[in-house]
Each structure stands twice: as structure tokens, then as C-alpha cells.
Amino acid sequence: IQFHQLYHQDGLAQSQVTDINQDNQGYLWAGTLGGISKFDGKTFSNYSTANGLTHNQVNAVFKGNKGKLWIGSLGGVAQ
């Protein structure tokens, strides 16, 4: 196995990743201390309180039974 590192300078919202989950479309979601990042295999899209998160410190990314992502942060839960 060979690992490839991705960093803040690659587009990740923040360098400290707290949780990772994959949605039903295959996107990887990385919770960080500075928001949440969606990775499509090439680029990141970042989301924060400006997009509806209750807090930028994301501690958990959970996929429910119907495939919806639940985002647990210091300020509560967002969907």
C-alpha cells in the first residue's frame, strides 16, 4: 500500500482532520477544526458556518441509514 497525503495547501479546510466518511455518491467528507471538506478525488470544496454549520470545529461526520450525512460540531448537529 502506498499512501498519498493531502494538506491544507491542497485545499483541505484545515490541517487537523477529526473524522472522515464517504457519501453514497462516493465523495469523501473530512471534518476538520476549520469546517468540513468534500473531496471528489481531485479537488476539495469547503463548507463552514457561512454555509450553515453550527460551528467550524467539526468533530463527527456520520452517514445515516438513508445516506444523509450528519455533521457534529462544537455548536451542535447539522444535516
Image (tube, rainbow, N blue to C red):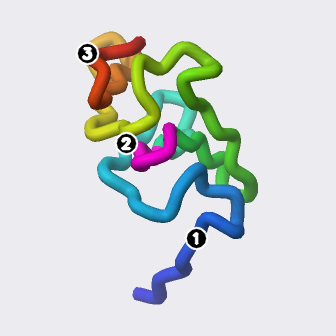
Q: Note whether 17 is above or below 73 in the view shown.
A: below
Is residue 36 rendered to the left or right of residue 7?
left
Q: Residue at x 54, y 80 (%)?
A: 4
Disc assigned to residue 6: 1
Query: Mark 2: few, some, or many residues within 10 Å (few <14, many ≥20)?
Result: some
Q: Which residue is mark 3?
A: 65
Residue 21 placed where, x, y %? Answer: 37, 42
Residue 14 placed where, x, y %? Answer: 53, 56
The amino acid beneath tag 3 is: Asn
Within the magenta stretch, is there residue 33?
yes
The amino acid beneath tag 1 is: Leu
Q: Note whether 26 is above or below 4 in the view shown.
A: above
Mark 1 vs 2: CB contact within 8 A: no
Q: Name the dominant secondary structure of the magenta segment.
A: strand
Residue 1 placed where, x, y %? Answer: 40, 87
- Label 2 element class: strand
Is residue 11 rendered to the left or right of residue 7?
right
The amino acid beneath tag 2 is: Asn
Disc assigned to residue 53: none
What is the CA distance from the residue labelled 3 to the residue labelled 1? Answer: 29 Å
Mark 3 vs 2: CB contact within 8 A: no
- Label 3 element class: loop
> Which quarter of the rendered picture does the C terminus lie within?
top left
Q: Which residue is mark 2?
A: 21
Comparing labels 3 and 2, the label whose residue is closer to the camera: 2
Residue toward you, 51 or 5: 51
Q: Which residues are magenta?
A: 30-35
The disc, 1 or 2, on the residue closer to the chain's N-terminal end is: 1
